[in-house]
Image (cartoon, grey):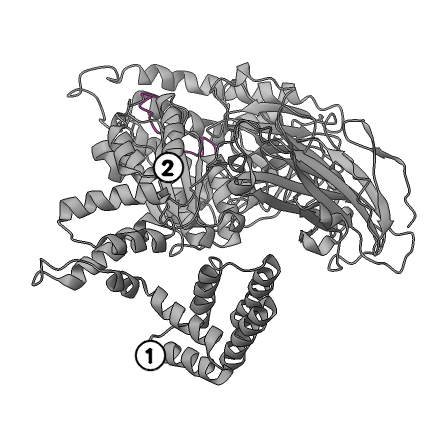
Amino acid sequence: MDIYQFDNEALSDNSTTVSISNIHERDDDHSTGLQDFTPIRDSILQSQVKYYSFNVNKTGVGESYQLIVFLTGNICSQPQGINPNETSLAVYYSFNSTMFTNNEIGQMKLFQSGYFQALAALEPSETTASAPKTQPVEQTVLYIAVRAPQNTNLTAEWTYQIGVSQNDLVFQWDETSAVSVVDADDTNVLLITRNLTVDTDDISSLNDSQVPYSVYVYPYEFKDYFAGINNSWCAVRNGPSIFGPGDYNTSYTNRTGGIHQQIFISGLNSSTKYIAYTINDNYGTEYGGSVFHPFEFETMESSPCQLIYDLEFCQSVAYSVPAPGNSTGPNRDKNATKWLYDSYAQDLYTNFSKALMQIACDTVPEAIFSNLKTCDDCADSYKDWLCSVSIPRCSTKNITGYKYRKDKEDHRNDFIRDVIQPDQPYYEVLPCIGVCNAIVRDCPAQFGFECPTKNESIALSYYWPRKGQANEQWPSCNRVGKMVVKIQSAGNKRMVINWVLLCLNVYGQQEIVDTVRKFVQTGKLPHLLFYGPPGTGKTSTIVALAREIYGSNYRNMVLELNASDDRGIDVVRNQIKNFASTRQIFSTNAFKLIILDEADAMTSVAQNSLRRIIEKFTKNCRFCILANYSHKLNPALISRCTRFRFHPIDEAAIKSRIENVITKEHVKIDNDALDALLKLSKGDMRRALNVLQACKSAIGVDNPHDSIDLDMIYECIGAPHPQDIETVLDSILKDDWTTAYITINKFKTVKGLALIDLIAGFIEILNNYKLKPKTRIEIFKNLSDIEYGISKGGNDKIQSSAIIGVIKNAMENEQ
């Protein structure tokens, strides 16, 4: 095998060595060492394999923790002519070093749309919990192989990035767009991001040079340029964009409620359509980030309109307005246009502000004009209305509801005609009727404000939003003002908890309880992920915690959902979103709590939607996700949570709880029955309690002196009795083949035993026999093959015969 050594360029500019081999050959001795959250950039030819390794950090890991390594990657470039539906690069990963010899040993994920993500989980039994604390912990290594598909083009080459981390996903993608179009004129466009999660409401304290989002603009003809790799962070960043970071102005704004990042791009062509991608680079590091679904925008025709924003008085105005005459072309002064409109509206507001001073605002409740609205509400609504009617929105699009202004005398007001003096016809986007209704609702009746109520009269000066067009670039009417409702917050007062009740009610998970206790006591409770086998205390822990925090306000502050029932995206979008988006005004707690039980049963689409809701409502809501299997959860969702693995509860803890119940409920149970109950519960506290309850009910009130015996435990659980297993095994070992076969069928029919149960029982009994290691291995291996055949629907008669043959043949060779 030929091994080609060359310098491989990492993003950190460190030179490393990588192994390339033919697809049918492997080499264990050469692999690139990956660093946490430092992705490596590499290239690969068709039919080749490259190898990487990552040393897992196990420092300070407790026995309840499952080690998780997040794997992500991007395809930066691919061969020309590749069909998006063709098989792409494959990534194999395993903690077993022999995977470098045989890739099929590892788990495999394919790149899809230029992106891949995976979880490599190391169970607690494989981590430091299995090693004595006095001995050094053996190094654990994650082995990774990237394999390129075969291609008719022998020089076909892919460029890609691979990133691993124990803390988060290095690369991500989002099926939604993080940016929306505010408005555009013929050469400029104004964009705004989704609401930012920041620790301040003062935008002046934010650094405009450290913005979270970047936009890359491409001509619309490039809409298929990223076909097959449109979810790739590095492909978008390195593509032939015509505008990128440094080519436009970016700043922060709070004009629509909340803090957003806004992006102003100039130098565009008129009547031109563009496609843009949004990137969110990881904060605090130069590596990795997220790519969002692309969005489109279009510039206007000619130049009758001019885009203005960030006005001093009419702060909510951010759209195109009729451009002043004789100011077209590159010499238009945007600031001069802003000042003309803003000062005009401010002058008009003067008389109203004086009139509002005559209203009883700050007075006793009996004299105030409204117990629901304040003078500030009235002033804000009037200001929004005034700005929308005095500063008309301009467009060159002929949309239903727009008013065509083609005559020099045909303008909304004298100011437009005499001062602005537009020299080209344009369409006016009429104000939304809602801005008028707001001043009627929010202001004192003394002002006598009235709004038109019939469609015919409304259409003379206003229009109304058309359903389904709220997010389009060309709205049906001009909405000025904040888009969100401000909810008063009761502050961040925190309740100190008495944890004695919680510690007494949760058994066998003391380390997790203590850790969560510290989170709450410090007021820094994160989103939580509790995962592990059923009956290990996941739900009990979080419910007990919630009842301690919220007390009598539990129903208002906590939403409990069983995601196995409510598993679709509608529940996430409606029930969960509605609960998370509101806040209890008079609550003494800073956040609500949403408990999602059996979350691993949620659909992938619902999990993606849930991740976005978690990000959006972190300020006033915490999520606790409960799951039996963490690998069924979206890695991006897992990365948002602090993870705790609930291990099966040890028999001592279950016994303590069971004995407590036995004493309080006056239950009589034989010692051997209690031992069997503890053994068969297999670390599941809930199962042990349910079986005990069922047995107690079976005795009934008519026989209070009867005790629960061994046979009753096995019958309630539905497990085969050890004596039955021993009888069948003795028949196999001592009787002829026909008699043994009849015995198996008899117990299957009379006792209702399944072959799977018999195999499990045989293994347990034979494990205590004094057998040669070779014999023991042969029996267990062949029984596992039979069990696999049964799980795949194998014929019962054939599998029964195989069991007899396997055991008899192995025991004969033992002699």
Residue 397 vertical position relative to residue 191 in the rendered view, above or below? below
Q: Is residue 185 above or below residue 698?
A: above
Residue picked out by circle 2: 509
Q: Main secondary structure of the magenta part?
A: loop
Q: Position of residue 3 (x, y in %)?
A: 90, 44
> Can see residue 474?
no
The amino acid beneath tag 1 is Val
Residue identifier under label 1: 750
Q: Position of residue 191 (x, y in %)?
A: 61, 33
Q: Position of residue 89 (x, y in %)?
A: 76, 51
Q: Which residues are magenta?
A: 479-493
Disc 1 element: helix
Which residue is rendered at x = 16% and y = 45% of the image?
A: 663
- State the residue in front, 10 or 185: 10
**Closer to the eye: label 1 or 2:** 1
Residue 486 inside the magenta-drawn segment:
yes
